[in-house]
Image (cartoon, coloured by chain):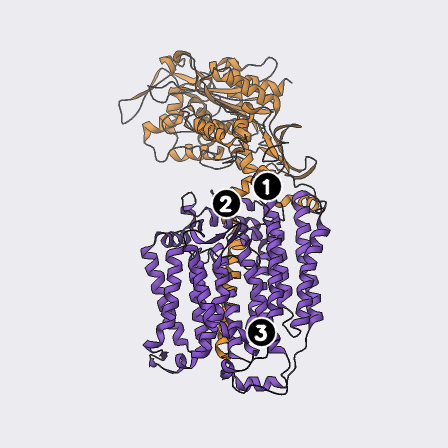
Chain colours: A purple, B orange
Amino acid sequence: MSMTQQGSLLGFVHRRRRGAELFLLFLALTVGIGGYAAVGVGVQGEVPPDILAYGGGLAVLILVAHVVVRLTAPYADPVLLPIVAALNGLGLAVIHRLDLAYEDAGRKHDYAQQQLVWMTVGVLLFVGTLVVLRDHRVLQRFTYTSGLAAILLLLMPMLPVVGRTINGARIWIHVGPFSLQPGEVAKVLLVVAFAGYLVLHRDALALAGRRVLFIDLPRGRDLGPILGMWLVSLGVLVFQKDLGSSLLFFGLFLVMLYIATERPGWLVVGSVMFLAGAFAAYELFGHVRNRVDIWLDPMAYYDRSPGSGQIVESMFGMAWGGLIGRGFGNGSPERIPFAESDFIIGAIGEELGLTAVIAVILCYVLIVERGLRTALICRDGFGKLVASGLACAFALQVFVVVGGVTGLIPLTGLTTPFLSYGGSSLVANWVIVALLLRISDQARRPVPDLSTPDDADSDATQVVKLG
Amino acid sequence: MNKPIRTMSLFCLLLLTALMLNATYLQYYRASALDDDPLNRRVIQAAFSRERGAILVGKEPVAESVPSDDAYKFQRQYPEPLKYAPVTGYFSYFSQTGIEKTENAVLSGDDSRLFVTRLLDLLSNAEPKGGSIDLTLNRKVQDAAYAGLKGLGPGAQGAAVAIEPSSGRILAMASVPTYDPNKLASHDLGEVTGIYDRLNSDTNEPLLNRSIQTALPPGSTFKLVTAAAAIEDQGYDADSLVPGGTTLDLPQTDNTIKNENGISCGGNRITLTRALEVSCNVSFGWLGLRLTDEELRTQAEKFGFGQHYLDDLGPQAISRFPDTLDDPLRAYSAIGQYEVAATPLQMAMVAAGIANQGVVMKPYLVDQVRARDTQVLDKTDDVRLSQAVSARTANELTKMMVGVVKQGTGTTAQIPGVLVAGKTGTAQSTPSRPPYAWFVSFAPADDPQIAVAVLVQSSDTDRSEIAGSRLAAPIAKAMMEAVVNP
């Protein structure tokens, strides 16, 4: 399998590259602070008076993250943190811009301030994850715990007291003053659970089966887990009306199953199940059919309810932005409902243009690439699965939300990672990055002379040194 | 596990590349189609929030943007709304017409000729501002035209156009009933919708610019075209003798052509000049029978019939001379009845062509394009549309038209001390509705400065009183006086 490659990697020692990370972080801060200043200049005609406080705060958060990485994960990938910092900073600037636009339109919000609080929480959890979790393999112990927690989290919005339906989707829980979108947290837990489960059972899933038309199809009894996940995804779709998460969870499971077993047959089985589920959902549920109809002819549904006003306004905005955008303050992003969350890419496209949209997507490409690279060089199967699962979840989520907003696929509704307003999503994504950094630190760290595991599959029983 | 990870990395790259391609398609290739979508309010909202250039007549604006302190930063204003509405059009949140529409690129500042200005605005961080448009209109002539039409009474429908014969510059373009574009440019969008619906459903069609959008039978003014064809193609001149009398028997039918009010043109053989002076239907019907379809149509087309020649305003109704005619219908067509239809602008071009030694100039309204009210970026050149008749024919026609005003049906257009050339027209449409009154003229006949066409489509005047000389000629006279007798 991958042993030969691992063998060749043993002689190669990765450099730490923390200096490079620091340099890139300065560039990222330029994006965040410069964006905030540009919003002030463009909308209010002056650099915001609190630019120093804001910039200082942002810099402190980022530098804390950097120092913690230096201390606890010195060999971690040097590109991930700067990209994430740049995206988060850009998101803050655009949300601040939208706050000002909403205020002009008579709807006052302070989303940007709240987002900054959530970013702080996110960075704290990032730090906490890196400090507490010194070896990602520890997580494998919590395979079933995470799975159970994920399912419970997904069920919570359905509970009568804490669950809330917001904008047609029942994906929120409210506890006291806090509201939480548990799906975002469940995403991380599901990756851990899938990885733990698959790394144990992959041989059974990979080897048994029969060959039909050049494709190795799995045995019927091994279909249990995929069938279970399929039902969970359908449940999310049917009961919570959350197309995006449903698609993401099932896609994520499928991808990880394929990576664990190396059998494209699973992809075939999974795709057939996905298509069957999607077709049934289209036939049975009005809200699914409505999304597809809108996707096919958005203009026809502009004035209806539920209609396409949001996506059409977003497309008009992006067209109006053109190649270089109208500039902060010269567009009308407030015309797009919920521009600060799901449709933030529309607001970016309008005021910063195609250039910025491509730049943002390229940032995601880099995140995914760094994640998958980590998976490639990772020495243990569990780490490989977690890293590749998180990276693919990222790619899928970006594809589903940006593709939906730009009319490539039917609109489903997910947050744009690190850009969109929303605490659950931001915090969960910071934890994801911490996990990726932890795995890449392990993967890039020079192999100790003693106790090299000679079989990746024995990970499950290996004694792990903590701390 | 590395092989599937590599496969997945390719798959993820594919997904994200698809996103980038789709974003490029949306923001670059499809952008202008989306910008033009009728549902898209962004473009118009931006236009509303930008200082739009002015439309100027002389040095004074007839449309300008002034600062406004509501949701949009500027308010479009029309200082003389009713008089200039047919030309300026309106600039509302929902639609635009007139110069506001055809010159929108300049006025909004998006025109490529304003590129340097835009760049300077960008660099100096100034608010972008549109360019302005100088119109060819002459304030005095426009005043006279509008005052004359307004004088017909509140229910009147009509239009008046004046052209400078040597250049094609449109000196006046008025139309009644008219409307107030200020009300349509209002920022109270609910009110705008209501007003627009009312104007649009009004049976008097106030939104119509009758000078270019109404093509009606030109009646006896078309005899100028018939006479031009007879002189050009069949060797007639002002003194050639043609049949007069009271009636013309039409071949193949029992119909006859009679003169207006059944009078005689005076004698059985009269000169062509006399025939035009008294607007003799018998003589010109007879000429119609002598000429071929082809000769009449070609002559009409040389004056501009069947053509689209006005680029500065739209939509323009196309004046027409009917296809394939039998003898009786050709006789009717030769006196401007049946299916012959012309806009007031077209008839002004007939007069202007005769005035300009037979050369018809392409009419235009936009004189100059300026950046920020000062620097001239572009000036419209005079363009020759066609040589409608030879200079000799034009002179013959001028002599005859001078006779019309001196001692014929057009005496009401006389201006003391100035030689005026003109022709009346009273076109019968259906017996159920009153005839249209026309007058076309130019002055001074020996050095033409202005050519005019006036159409009174309907007015409060008693039916028996309707005639080109009574209703239309005085308006034309006032318009000519504004130029030749300043």
Q: Amino acid at mark 1?
A: Glu
> Residue tagged by mark 1?
A103
Would residue A241 appear left or right of A109 to someone viewing this image? left
User: Which of pointers 1 and 2 indicates the residue nearer the eye?
Assistant: 1
Q: Callout 3: residue from which chain?
A: A
Q: Would residue A345 be seen by someone viewing this image from the given angle?
A: yes
**Image vertical order of residue A210 relative to residue A27, above or below:** below
Q: Would residue B403 be seen by someone viewing this image from the given angle?
A: no
Mark with earlier residue (1, 3): 1
| Mark 1: secondary structure | helix
Foreground residue among B11 and B204: B11
> Residue tagged by mark 3?
A439
Residue found at x 51% / y 47%: A336
Q: Are marks 1 and 3 on the same chain?
A: yes
**Image vertical order of residue B369 relative to residue A164, above or below:** above
Question: Would you call the spot at circle 3 few (<14 residues within 10 Å), some (14-19), or many (20 or more)?
Answer: many
